[in-house]
Image (spheres, coloured by chain):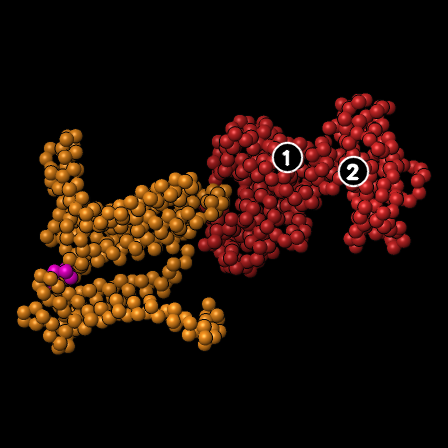
Chain colours: A orange, B red
Amino acid sequence: MTGSRTSTSPAAAGLAAWLLAPSLVWMGLFCILPLSIVFLISVASRGTYGGVEWTFTLANYRDLVDPLYLYIYARSFALALATTGLCLGLGFPLAYYIARAPARWQGIWLMLVLIPFWTNFLVRTYAWMNVLRADGLLNTILIGTGVVAGPIEMLYSDAAVLIGLVYGYLPFMVLPLYVAVERIDRSLIEAARDLSASGWAVFTRVIVPLAKPGIVAGCLLVFIPSLGAYITPDLLGGARSMMIGNFIQHEYLVVRDWPLGSAASFVLMAIVLAGLWQYQRTGGMKP
Amino acid sequence: MSHASVELREVVKRHGSTVAVDHLSLSVRRGEFFSILGPSGSGKTTTLRLIAGFERPDQGDMLIDGRSIVDVPPNLRPVNLVFQQYALFPHLTVFGNVAFGLEMRGVARAEIQSRVGEALDMVQLAGKGDRLPTQLSGGEQQRVALARALVNRPAVVLLDEPLGALDQQLRQEMQGELKAIQEQVGLTFVCVTHHQEEALTMSDRVAVMDHGRLLQVGAPQDIYDAPASLFVAEFIGLSNRLDGRIAAVQGTRCRIEAPGLPAIQADVPEGAGPGSAVSIVVRPERLHLSQQATVSGFDNVVPARVAKAVYNGHEMQYQLRIAERLLWTVRVPNADGGQKRFLPGEAVMVRWNRGESVALTR
């Protein structure tokens, strides 16, 4: 790779620069610029009535080292991890089943996985409120069939947030897993069987290692957005089940402490980037 | 009590409406290099997959060392398969691939080390244990696949077109090596191939299959010299064919008449009599050419004209026009420089004894 790069002619380099220009402009305008602004605000001070005063300070970052805020970070991580774990647990069997189904069924199954995306995420989250409410669908069924005597309080809890997150991000897990499993040569599974591997050993020693790029991609695609989730905990979570996303929103729009909200955003981003960097360093996407 | 290593009894396997394996009965001796030879669609690969356990027979029984394996899952069968495209685990090193079967069976670490080492030595891959399969050449990958099967010391080693993915040169080298390794380890090898030269050079015995049926089993020489059917005669090696009808029978010999040709002397095919439609098959290297019309000492002398003459270095290969629409191939080794070479258009006499031909009923 590096060999071919060093031998690029000046003309080709010029062309490459032109081809790159649109995406560079896009990245500059919509990624670097806003992030720079957020960063600047995060090291500025809060005005008495909510505005931003341009006096440099690291106080916002210091303020974040507060048990209450650390607790919110920890909760967010726990929920994002649980979401990722549940999505992996539910998504792997599903992806495996789809990947091994006859070709004409694979398309149908994949479409069924994707159909929820055709509806707005907010609307789908409201639908979950209707399912989980005290007088909602689930309680009506449970009471109607006599499983429980009175309604169970399900909405506005961590469990509700978890259900909402798993529901929302499961397709992001299933799709990369499907691609990874589908690519595994069937004869490798037969070879493992032939070499005395039990069904479980085939799974752990052959399928999982070979599906690793898909597992990693799926986990990242689920973990990162769940960590910063905002709508789901806002609608399904209780007043005290705040996640980082809600905290940032709260600081910006309710407390009007933009500098603290900006600092919180930056810390979140730094944590995610550090995790990704560490992952890449230790071998990353290779199966 | 001594059992056959592998025994198939009236095995039937259907894929949808087609019968892939049709009442197949086979018996493979212990320590034998046994090849199943046939064109694609002959059911040979299905047979191998049945023995490996990836498919279940619809009917019949299969035994290894006298015990039925029909209900034994593939991971518990005492067989190991060398896959056609090798199916090496891409995420494991050469060592990891070869050690896989031993690890699965809970063999102690120290023993795995020594046995994998031995196996890699045997296939001349010592010192390459830490490579990944993608860093190996095709021939080396083939050796890893072989070592991965041999290291488990299975009752039967199954090979699916083992040399099919190699180029011609390597293929010929590996033929000898594979046979040598088999003799060294003394395991039963069952090899599936569509490549007849491979089957003839490596095998102790060859089974020829077509359309799911077993046509003939025998030593390579028997298969080549005494084919039991026209299909076998034409599938194995080059053969010249002549269709005719038996005019008269005299003891074990008969006189066959074919339009436009002198009467041909041949051995009587089993169950044939006067009037039977038969075919004569002669191998290209069994035919003799001469210019003189009168030569004694041969049962058959047929006039022909040279249509094509090709110099191959070690031999001359002639296409001869016999009768109106019949082209025969004749091979004459370049034994010494004084051989008479015939030119296209020249008239020649083709001669052979009846023992050098095979007559088969059609």
Q: Is residue A254 visible?
A: yes
Q: Which mark is residue A104?
A: none
In the rendered structure, which segment of residues is drawn in magenta? A247-251
Q: Is residue A64 visible?
A: no
Residue A48, above or below B13: below
- SS assignment at label 1: strand
Amino acid, disc 1:
Met
Between A214 and A135, the one nearer to me in the picture: A135
Between B275 and A281, the one nearer to me in the picture: B275
Residue B41, above or below B268: below
Q: Position of residue B18 (x, y in %)?
A: 54, 31
Amino acid, disc 2:
Arg
Chain letter behind tag 1: B
Residue depicted at 83% across the width and 29% down the height = B257
Q: Confirm whether the magenta stretch covers residue A250.
A: yes
Q: Quadrant of residue B45?
A: top right
Q: Label 2, on which residue?
A: B325
User: Dominant secondary structure of the magenta stretch?
Assistant: helix
Residue depicted at 57% across the width and 49% down the height = B146
Between A185 and A131, the one nearer to me in the picture: A131
Q: Label 1, on which residue?
A: B209
Q: Position of residue B86 (x, y in %)?
A: 54, 49
